[in-house]
Amino acid sequence: MAEQTPKRLAAALGDADFPAYAMGTAAEAIGVTPAFLRAVETAGLFASHRSGGGHRRYSRDDLERADRARVLADEGLRLDAVVRIVDLEYRLAAANAMIAILQSRLAAPPQQP
């Protein structure tokens, strides 16, 4: 059973949605203050995860969104606009990924039973 724990941990750390980062580490990693992370969360960019003790935890995906928000905020955009832009960019990326999957399925030869 001890062997499964490192494997599960490695799998979790490879998961972009796994909340692996505490607030201080997350803020430092993308060059923002903890207050900025709280502000973008409050504005609806993402919902942070909570540890058993109630501390905010962030995933790689959360940090990528917050980093993009930081870039846009540094360009002078208001926080509500930043959140909307980042949300739309992520939706567009997901739609483009789905289009690519569907196109590859259409291009693949039909499977024989």
Image: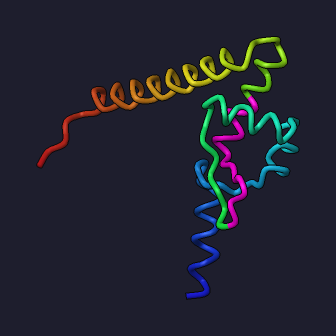
Relative vertical location of residue 36 with respect to residue 79 in this rendering, above or below: below
Q: Can residue 58 be found in the magenta stretch? A: yes
Query: Where are the magenta residues, as a range?
Result: 53-67
Q: Can residue 93 be found in the magenta stretch? A: no
Can you give x and y, in whole percent of width and height, for residue 98 in the image? 40, 29
Q: Is residue 16 left or right of residue 55?
A: left
57, 91: nearer the viewer: 57
What residue appears at the point 39 percent right and 24 percent down from the top-left corner?
99
Quarter of image, res 77: top right
What residue appears at the point 11 percent right and 49 percent down from the top-left corner?
113
Q: Is residue 96 left or right of residue 65?
A: left
Can you give x and y, in whole percent of width and height, for residue 9 in the image? 63, 69
Q: How many marks?
A: 0
Q: Is residue 60 left or right of residue 75?
A: left
Can you give x and y, in whole percent of width and height, for residue 40 in the image? 70, 31
Q: Quadrant of the N terminus?
A: bottom right
What residue appears at the point 62 percent right and 17 percent down from the top-left corner?
85
What residue appears at the point 66 percent right and 14 percent down from the top-left corner?
81
Q: Is residue 54 left or right of residue 12?
A: right
Relative vertical location of residue 5 with respect to residue 27 in this rendering, above or below: below
16, 102: nearer the viewer: 16
